[in-house]
Image (cartoon, grey):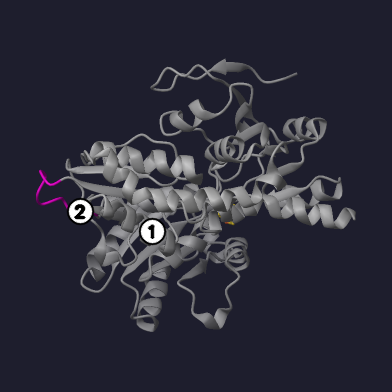
Amino acid sequence: MNAPVFPVGNEKGCDRPILQERGQREVFCGLTSIVWLHRKIQDAFFLVIGSRTCAHLIQSAAGVMIFAEPRFATAVIEERDLAGRADLHDELDSVVGRLLERRPDIKLLFLVGSCPSEVIKLDLGRAASRLDAKLRERVRVLAYSGSGIETTFTQGEDACLSALVAEMPRMADEKGARLLVVGSLADVVEDRFRVLLEGMGIPVDFLPPRLSRDLPPVGPGTRFLLAQPFLGETARALEERGAKHLPAPFPFGEEGTTAWLGAAARSFDVPQARFEDVTAPARARARAGIARHRAALEGKSIFFFPDSQLEVPLARFLSRELGMKPVEVGTPYLHRKHLADDLDLLASDILVSEGQDVDRQLDRCRSAAPDLVVCGLGLANPLEAEGLTTKWSIELVFSPVHGYEHAGDLAELFARPLGRRGRLRV
Ligand code: SF4
């Protein structure tokens, strides 16, 4: 029996039916986002309070050699901690003390909660406040949860950034409006966006910054664009501090990037001619980059399992700019308001599902027999063994895929597995 289909009421009154699924899920936990966050905030350290499983997850996901002195580690909760034979707060203080002695470059320390720390109800928020008060001259200490209980892997970034919002200084001049781009972007992508936005005369900051001391100010003069669709809590925290969200499709492909930049341009009264002058060369390059992969992707069907929360804007990009045919677009969570523009651009006969009941979704996928399946690592190998062609969704978060200059690279990420499968069949 299928789950009920009922209409969604987003702010624009979209009544698109969404299939709601509540069952067995196959997703990574929020700790995974440390892999890209530790590269982005270059003076931050992520100390996971967790188990050996947590340590193995991050170590293997990041693929970092131990002698490379990565800016993340796991303080492993041992059996005697679980048995209540040790004072965990004392143990944590001692671990943090040793860490800071060894790594004087750390200026921002995140205590990251996990399933084990949540199960034993270790209050990391309280621990962070205590350590922050003690060490404030030397390092800032914040806490957030990356646990896999009821979360998916991109929510780790949302939890991290919403913890950072509380630390952003108050905007001194509330009359001078500034744009804030929210979401961790590869430096090369951030630099391109800065050039385009400043070329239009828009003053812009980025969250997270590359160095923790450069946290931008926030206040009623802040207008923000989300660069990622999984930042609902961060957006809410910014709005509580007076910032205003600019609704837009997400900046994937030429169309999405133009609409996203266009939302900022409208808000800052940039004349149309100036917008055209600044964006035209990059738009042309994006169209050329996309065109190189159109023949490989046009007319091919694609099925998204819920994983990264990027699924809806990616399906919009692939269907509208490359002619692909999404069969089902599954996403772990659907923020109706933030995804309203992307949902509006997705053809109405494409099934959008939220949440997961993995067995039923596998049945739908097998019966659709799509040309390409986008899914997590756990499903990819079994589906490949059944003869389906897969793309790991986590790669889409690890790779620079936003904006004009990477539109062709983004298309290539989907064309590559199809090409590989074609070569294997020859
Ligand atoms: S946080 Fe939970 S789901 Fe993630 S690795 Fe640790 S135990 Fe596993």
- How far is the residue under mark 1 from the one under mark 2? 22 Å
Q: Does the residue labelled 1 lie within 8 Å of ligand 1?
A: no
Determine the image quadrant of residue 11: top left
On screen, residue 231 above or below 413: above
Foreground residue among 24 and 255: 255
Q: Quadrant of the N terminus?
A: top right
**What is the x, y in percent for residue 403?**
45, 51
Residue at 46% over, 51% down: 404
- Residue 172 on the magenta segment: yes
Residue at 39% over, 41% down: 260
Main SS type for the magenta part? loop
**What is the x, y in percent for residue 373?**
72, 43
**What is the x, y in percent for residue 407?**
53, 51
Q: Name the residue under label 2.
A: 217
Q: 10 Å neighbourhood of mark 2: few (<14), some, or many (≥20)?
A: some
Q: In this view, does 392 lie to the left or right of 177?
A: right
Foreground residue among 9 and 120: 9
Q: Which numbered circle lies on residue 231?
A: none
For the residue labelled by badge 2, is the local secondary structure a helix, a strand or a loop? loop
Q: Name the residue under label 1.
A: 192
- Residue 187 on the magenta segment: no
- Where does the magenta region start and end? 168-176
On screen, residue 291 above or below 269: below
Residue 120 visible? The answer is no
Residue at 31% over, 36% down: 246
Q: Is mark 2 within 8 Å of ligand 1?
A: no
**What is the x, y in percent for residue 338?**
42, 34
On screen, residue 22 above or below 274: above
Q: In which quarter of the image is the C terminus?
A: bottom right
Q: Is residue 393 left or right of residue 120?
A: right
